[in-house]
Amino acid sequence: MIGQSPFRIFLAHAVLILGILIVAFPIYYTFVASTQTLQTILRPPLPFWPGDQFWNNYSEALFGGVGRIGGVGVGRLLLNTTIMALGVAVGKIFISILSAYAIVFFRFPLRMTFFWLIFITLMLPVEVRILPTYKVMVDLGMIDTYAGLIIPLIASATATLLFRQFFMTIPGELVEAARVDGAGPWRFFFDILLPLSRTNIAALFVILFIYGWTQYLWPLLVTNSNNMNTIVIALRKMVSFADADTQWHLVMVTAMLAIMPPILIVVLMQRWFVRGLVESEK
Amino acid sequence: MTPRVIFPNKILPYLLVAPQLAITLVFFYWPAGQALYQSMLRQDPFGLKSRFVWFANFRKVLVDPAYLNSIKVTVVFSLATAIVAMGVALLLAVMAEKVVRGKGIYRTLMIWPYAVAPAIAGMLGLFLFNPSIGSLSYLLRRFGIAWDPLLNGTHAMILLVAAAAWKQISYNFLFFIAGLQAVPKTLIEAAAMDGASETKRFWTIVFPLLAPTTFFLLVVNTVYALFDTFGIVHAVTGGGPGKTTETLVYKVYNDGFVNLILGDSAAQSVILMIIVIALTAIQFRYVERRVHYG
């Protein structure tokens, strides 16, 4: 390796620290704001260190119910969002591992047609079919239901493609050996394929959980009642920049609670996260 | 590539693909077909009468100054977001490759904005830069800048780009790190022995070898700026002030759900579909290339 001059190393650290300040500052400042009284927030500049309102603000938001969003507590919003994120992650992995299994390990008429039908959905994100999809939801009575929040999002070409890619690297000998030993398709799936896919599933789970947690347009469309909102949508409803009665201290608490779970998952499961990100986008 | 050994079942494979296929047909193909059909209908806002008008909606949309404006807004917004997010990420990735001590910590601290929802990123941005209570706008005012993203279109756009790019830095950072690690060290050492300075080594060796990563990220960032930033626009500016930040996706939503001009909204959806198809095609062509040369 080429030696680096101490000055350049120092410069590199300086740039990185500056970068981290830019990246982390908004999140830190949100935390600071979430521990201040409303009066302090309304008079800028905000102090640089956390205030003493931590317990008051957090317990008020979590258990008191927030007036602007119909008195729904943040606990309820967190529950909705968790159900949605878990549902999307688990559902997506479940249906795409099954269809990838069928496409790789079976030969049947229309196999490639099915594959292309799934593949093309890559090109049809929610954003380009907003209104007709909404109408389908209304016709099926899925507005304001967890099923409505989750099911339309779990059909995903990327997850299916990822599993297909991985299954194709499994040597034919392994399948043959399993069959010689008398394993049927289910036994092969549960005893061999699933254990081999563990790391892929974990990596995908992290990515999909965050995907589900950060959805905006879809929950905006399919939830009307305050009880069914996800935390991101409720946060939007709590903020009004035009009038002065926004409860900023509660907004900031809600924002903290909305960003902490996915951040914790990313940081704690960093290895899977990085892997899942790089793999699923290939 | 495919395993030679397969299972002979006749019905099981259909059962296995059935769930995904059912959801795909009901929630993807049926609505997409409806969008295509509706894009050629003209309907009154109450849904009482509609008539088939072929491509009239497209013609109307494509000459509508509001639509042309939103194309311009989208292009400016997407380019600015992609360039800022990728530029900052590349700089940080190059620096992170240089340091030996604390590499892991830097990476951990760099990746968390990925987990922040775009809409929340936007709202935090607006909280910091809000003209009345934002601490950073307070600072800007102290420096004599009349900062007001709620009234000034350019300021609103800057705020959106900053929030959108901020959230995307971590993603680009990870990919640039992966790309930098793939650059052969021997090439860099050889150049160093020939007396190339560090800057020169970067621009003549590292940067060209990063081209596939950069190009890939350009496509991904464009798609992100086009579609995933709906939340930022909706939560922060609502397309305003005026129409200065109304992106294409926001306009589809606004015309369809708020203004109830169904035909126009559907025609815009179809145009967006064409854009996505083009971008996806580009992305996959590129992936093909990487398989050959990578």
Image: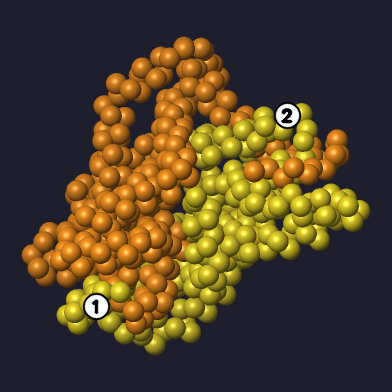
Chain colours: A yellow, B orange
Please say whether residue B32 is visible from this viewpoint: yes
The image quadrant where one finds the N terminus of chain A is: bottom left
Examine the rendered structure and indicate whether residue A231 appears above or below residue B70.
Answer: below
Q: Quadrant of residue A3?
A: bottom left
Q: Position of residue A210 (x, y in %)?
A: 53, 60
Indicate the amino acid at tag 2: Leu
The tally of labels here is 2
Nearer to me, B251 or B62:
B62
| Residue drawn at point x = 54 percent, y = 20 percent | B37
What residue did someone put label 1 on? A3
Nearer to me, B182 or B153:
B182
Chain letter of disc 1? Answer: A
Indicate the amino acid at tag 1: Gly
| Residue drawn at point x = 47 percent, y = 40 percent | B288
Q: Nearer the viewer, mark 1 or mark 2?
A: 1
Chain letter of disc 2? Answer: A
What residue did someone put label 2 on? A110
Left or right: residue B200 compared with residue B177: left
Left or right: residue A55 compared with residue A100: left
| Residue drawn at point x = 34 percent, y = 72 percent | A24
Q: Position of residue A46 (x, y in %)?
A: 27, 77
Q: Which mark is residue A24?
A: none
Quote the CA–CA distance across marks 1 and 2.
59 Å
Circles 1 and 2 on the same chain: yes
The kind of secondary structure element at disc 2 is: loop
